[in-house]
Amino acid sequence: MSLMPTYSRLPVTFVRGEGVHVWDRNGKRYLDALAGIAVCGLGHANPAVAAAISTQAGELLHTSNLYGIEKQQALADALVSLSGMEVVFFCNSGAEANEAAIKIARAHGHSKGIEKPEIIVTDHSFHGRTLATLSATGNAKVHSGFEPLVEGFVRVPFDDLAAAERAAKDHSGVIAVLVEPIQGEGGVVVPDPSYLSGLRSLCDRRGLLLMLDEVQTGMGRTGAWFTHQHYGISADVMTLAKALGNGVPIGACLARSEAAAALKPGSHGSTFGGNPLACAAALAVIATIQREHLVERAAEAGARLAAGLKRALSGQNCVVEVRGRGLMIGIELDRPCAELVGMALERGLLINVTAERVVRLLPPLIISNEQIDEVAGTLGSLIRTWNAGGAAAE
């Protein structure tokens, strides 16, 4: 074995992709309703992204952040325009983007004379697997074996505004709140519509930074460029990654107001962050989403998929809830259902199960109505078979 055993991989290797489909080494085609875990929002082998990567690879790959990078500046300008934020730090992943957010909060706290700044985080959250971001994550399984955890996080239940209010009151060192607008790894948990606006109000009243982890929910996934825009609020810090590069590793930490000035030259950095190749890919992603109106399409497609799933699963007593927003959908079942992943693989459908009993769907934003209906029909059939105690088709 030459790979560290950090993943329990499924028994399949993909060699080619096009649109919403991928093909394995034996030529079998699969409909990808997971999109590389919300990464390939434009699907596989998107022509515009492929062309941008090819052109940039023939011009300039890397110089480092010791020098100006033209496409990095263009990408920063585009993200600022879309988000209403002020400045951007580029890195290589969502975990790195959240690390930057945590450092911003701590630096901001120290500037306010707080010796030990603290950040409010939530149960069942997921922010990454570096030591700081796994410490912020609200999942004991992620923590296991890596203690002692990084200090400075105050944990409260998700979607519980009163608990956040108490934590801010009881902990004098609290300087920020870090939260996902919709919990992804936690089971596609959609909070009450008043939750994010309530957190915004709390932060405004107590002088805290509202830091939104939009790594999975951003870039059009839920029918808005960034999910918090559904609620008419602004973040002080926002993190992005996943779909920003459509498969090319890139992360971004955006900030505004006081948070925008927290990091100074020498206080943070990244060797590869925002290099010409990654930024060229991300610029192509943004241009394609805009040109093809994929933010609006995600809202329409998600409504169709959710409705189709509800019809296909009507009368199934194992279904607790079909929930989500846009093309971020979870089907909560009444018991652990990991075996559905393998059953779906046999049927040529890529899905994921998270939080033990939630089927998570994150299909590409380009998915057609016909393909949406195929996902709903196939998954509905599989869950019915599973609920009846049946096995995967041979």
Image (spheres, rainbow, N blue to C red):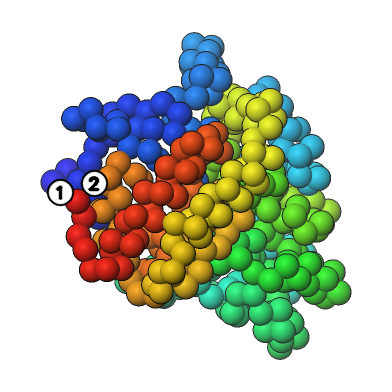
Dot 1 lies on which element? loop
Q: Position of residue 330 (x, y in %)?
A: 49, 60
Residue type at numbered disc 2: Glu
> How many other residues sit within 10 Å of disc 1, few (<14), some (14-19) or many (≥20)?
few
Looking at marks 1 and 2 on the same chain, the residue that comes earlier in the sequence is marked by 2
**Whether residue 57 is situated above or below residue 230 in the rendered picture:** above
Residue type at numbered disc 1: Glu
Dot 2 lies on which element? helix
**Whether residue 58 is situated above or below residue 50 in the rendered picture:** above
Disc number at residue 246?
Answer: none
Regarding residue 207, the answer to whether it shows in the image is no
Task: Tell which tag, 1 or 2, sits nearer the viewer.
Answer: 1
Give me the residue at 73% from left, 67% from top: 193
Give me the residue at 75% from left, 55% from top: 230
Q: Please name whichever residue, 301 or 101, is drawn nearer the observer in this view of the structure.
A: 301
Q: Which residue was labeled with disc 1? A: 394
Q: Please name whichever residue, 75 or 46, is drawn nearer the observer in this view of the structure.
A: 46
**Whether residue 78 is situated above or below residue 101 in the rendered picture:** above
Disc number at residue 346?
Answer: 2
Q: Are marks 1 and 2 in contact (CB under 8 Å)?
A: yes
Give me the residue at 58% from left, 48% from top: 304
Q: Is residue 98 left or right of residue 139?
A: right
Q: Is residue 117 left or right of residue 216?
A: right
Q: Is residue 223 left or right of residue 189?
A: right
Q: Position of residue 120 (x, y in %)?
A: 64, 74
